[in-house]
Amino acid sequence: MRQLQALATPAGAAALTRARELLADRTDAVTALTRLRSEVGVELAGPAWGIARQRERARPAFGADADRFFFTADALEQAGRPLLADRRAARLLADGARSVVDLGCAAGTDTIALARAGAAVVAVDLDPVARELTRLNAAAAGLRGVEIRAADAVDLVAAAIGGRVATCDAAVLDPARRAGGRRQLDPDRWSPPWSTVQALLDTAPTCVVKVAPGLDHDRVPAGVEAEWVSLGGSIVEALLWGRAPSRTWRRATVVGRDGVLHELTADTDPGDAEPGPVRGWLHEPDPAVIRSGLVALAATELDATLVDPTIAYLTSDAAADSPWVSSYRVTDVLPFNLKKLKALLRARGVGRVVVKKRGSPIEPETLARQLRGPGEDSAVVVVTRVAGAPTALVCAAP
């Protein structure tokens, strides 16, 4: 707390500027800290270096805000991307909610998105550091009307009256899913635990909860929309929407390279795609499509089938211009055998290989080294199961 408050002073701002300059010059940590101690003093040097490093990590997502916001490593890990925070805020407020409680404000990034969208926000956290981060960041964003409280989300949800938590129209909950630097895979060990998540969804119609992408679908209550969001081929958030903002059963959202959002939705379970033989093209569904259970919808759109009933690879006769999949032209299909696979690649002049796998115990990095050769061409090797049999699919490099 004292360190954050010291960095919020003019002397602290000067220390942060100097730390950023040293980072920009790629100065190693030992040298940078030595210089900072001599230039800004021992008390400011370490904290300034730490915050400057987190700002550098945040810059690709937060842009100009990164250089005025304060983050700890844990708070930045929990912070969502501003583009998605703005989207969540807009959807949560779309039906007329005017006030929102942010249950577990961390660094205040959701609080800021909600306030910028026009809501009166009550930011809640038991951690005094989280509250101070939120206070500093809200001030840096020019938001003066945010109320910050020391309170327990468990108690506030339990005390909800008439669908309102902390007397607010809507609620945002982002349970901490790390403890001691390790991910907590069991939702009952989140903070607050799953029981509070379920209570909020049952009590407050207008709410949204961030959950782990691997959440078991069986835990999603009836009438609650579950959404998975991916960016750059990785799932960046999973959401459970309260019954008021829910619009469908499942939603997969893919953020394109241009920042455009593509959404695939289903009102009911579409079931599984049909299996079939490997054809001229292999399609790798986006992780959000897989986790949302909507592969069958993508298959229908592409006139594609599964290579195996248990594997989320699709195949069709044509390439796909689709946000839901990445496509690879198949050149060879053979039973998985390292010696024969190496011989085939050598015969084709392939020396550089990218290995993908699904439904196989192989380590992609290890196999890629084993397949590396003197050839100048490249290929993608997909190790998977086809109709239950271990199979290697050799594909042209994209």
Image (cartoon, helix red, strand yellow):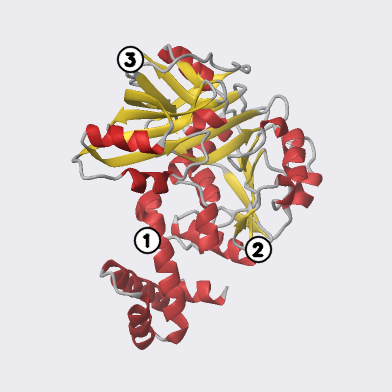
Q: Which of marks 3 and 2 is nearer the N terminus?
A: 2
- Depth check: give the residue in front, 169 or 111: 111
* Image quadrant occupied by the N terminus: bottom right
Identify which amino acid the numbered label 1 is placed on: Glu
Contact (CB < 8 A) between labels 1 and 3? Answer: no
* Image quadrant occupied by the C terminus: top left
Q: Residue 68, image x and y in percent?
A: 40, 61
Looking at the image, the residue that sits furthest to the left is 376
- Depth check: give the residue in front, 213 or 388: 388
Q: Earlier in the sequence, mark 1 or mark 2?
A: 1
Give residue 244's quadrant in the image: top right
Instruction: Give the residue number, with chain letter if any, for mark 3.
Output: 318
Identify which amino acid the numbered label 2 is placed on: Asp
Q: Is residue 234 visible?
A: yes
Q: Residue 269, image x and y in percent?
A: 63, 18
Q: What element carries label 3?
A: loop
Q: Give the left or right position of residue 287, taking residue 272 as reference.
A: left
Tag 3: Cα neighbours inside 10 Å, few (<14), some, or many (≥20)? some
Of marks 1 and 2, the one in the foreground:
1
- Depth check: give the residue in front, 45 or 165: 45
Identify which amino acid the numbered label 3 is placed on: Ala
Please tell me the numbered disc located at residue 3: none
Instruction: Give the residue number, with chain letter if any, for mark 1.
Output: 56
Residue drawn at 41 percent across, 86 percent down? 41
Give residue 99's quadrant in the image: top right
In space, the residues marked 3 and 2 are separated at their CA atoms by 54 Å
Q: Is mark 1 on a helix, strand or loop?
A: helix
Q: Earlier in the sequence, mark 1 or mark 3?
A: 1
Instruction: Give the residue number, with chain letter if any, for mark 2.
Output: 127
Q: Residue 232, image x and y in percent?
A: 39, 39
Tag 1: Cα neighbours inside 10 Å, few (<14), some, or many (≥20)? some
